[in-house]
Amino acid sequence: MKFPLIALTLAWPAALLAQPQPSDWEAVLAEADGQTVYWNAWGGSTATNDYIAWIGDRVAEYGVTLEHVKLADTADAVTRVLSEREAGQDDGGAIDLIWINGENFIAMKEAGLLFGPFSTELPNYAFVSDDPAITTDFGMPVDGMESPWAKAQFVFMYDSADTDAPADMQALLDWTAENPGRFTYPQPPDFLGTTFLKQVLVSQAEDPTVLSDPMEEADFDTVTAPLWEYLDALRPNLWRGGEAYPTSGPAQFQLLTDEEIDIAPSLSPSEASTAIANLQLPESVRTFVPEGGTIGNVSFLAIPYNSSAKAGAMVVANEILSPEAQLRGQDPEVLGYGTVLDMGALDPEMRQAFEDLDQGIATLSPAELGEALPEPHASWASAIEAEWIERYGAQ
């Protein structure tokens, strides 16, 4: 009975030693040379797809081939890794890198499906801002198990040729009553649609601090009652009377362009400017943040425990943290994502380059955006999605 345990004890340290260690970066680079990294990432945005292709050109200099596996739902990648583990495939997995955050990260971390910790030892992590939004993900400590790559904050796009910006969330509700059919949001569980629900929840809850704890520790019906009251009042005045919803954030662009709606949510403060630059939105579109603030979060990269190209995946994650890649990502004509870097950690020339970056005509300044509100604990998202579908999804 003891032999298998002894064998496992002898074998496990060898497996650990075989893993690439970011603290020995030269060894990581040597191992990464010749690897192909299959990055599973949402593929619904041409701008994002082009940026990932640009990153691929950058890491090719290290001998790494980057393949973008375009996802409609990150949960598909989580399911794939889980299925591989259940089948006993503990190495040579099909996924090397995942664009992830929130409930999918928590699910993988709690199930032991992630490689790491690795992120804080990446060479370019020295440039990363010391920000609680980067060290935690939907209330869960990151613990080096995922690497940040972009900041986001919830805003609303509006066509300034047709309307003014409502002052706060109650004013938005009142505006929809005065302008029926001119506002919508993507159908949950689309990520942006769910974020709109969370924005309403945080703004309307009597005590938003309870949302930082797991949903099971609170009275769900009591805490979420103001959310459903708000949505019940909003729904009849939505685009198409709330009988249909856009399938995604980009799907809203066409509604704005066709002047079917005047206001729509976005999770990227610069998305409108980028879309204007790409001729996807009218030049009259602007953005606003309601009084009281909006939810902010960070996108991360994670490496599955059974990745077949962990070293190459780390090279990709490190490259995205480079000041050059972050500067390009913040350019509204490229992506318009918020940077995760600390400007004080950059050299004067690069810091100036960020300061000189034209954020675009529709992008609010950091002062106008204000402090981002924390995301509720991930357990709230799935619960309000399920309740939303029960209440409105089948109608």
Image (spheres, rainbow, N blue to C red):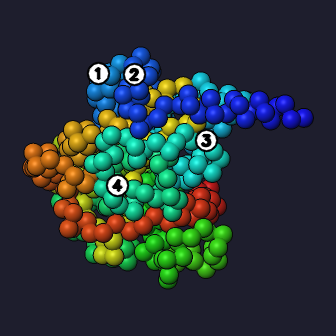
Label 4 element class:
strand
Q: Amino acid at mark 1?
A: Glu
Label 3 element class:
loop
The residue pinned by badge 2 equals: 30
Q: Amino acid at mark 3?
A: Leu
Q: Residues within 10 Å of mark 3 (few under 14, many from 20)?
A: many
* Residue 209 relative to residue 165: left or right: right
Query: Which of pointers 2 and 1 indicates the residue nearer the eye?
Result: 2
Q: Quadrant of the N terminus?
A: top right
Closer-to-camera residue (38/88): 88
Label 4 close to label 1 by CB (< 8 Å): no
Q: Amino acid at mark 2?
A: Ala
Closer to the chain start, of discs 1 and 3, is 1
Q: Residues within 10 Å of mark 1 (few under 14, many from 20)?
A: few
Q: CA distance from mark 2 to mark 3?
A: 25 Å
Q: Is residue 215 above or below residue 92?
A: below
- Residue at 37 percent of width and 74 percent of height: 169
Label 1 element class:
helix
Closer to the chain start, of discs 2 and 3, is 2
Label 2 element class:
helix
The residue pinned by badge 1 equals: 61
How far from the left and from the top, in percent, is residue 183? 37, 61
- Residue at 54 percent of width and 49 percent of height: 105
Q: CA distance from mark 2 to mark 1?
A: 12 Å
Query: Which of pointers 4 and 3 indicates the residue nearer the eye?
Result: 3
Q: CA distance from mark 4 to mark 2?
A: 34 Å
The residue pinned by badge 4 equals: 152
Closer to the chain start, of discs 4 and 2, is 2
Query: Which of pointers 2 and 3 indicates the residue nearer the eye?
Result: 2
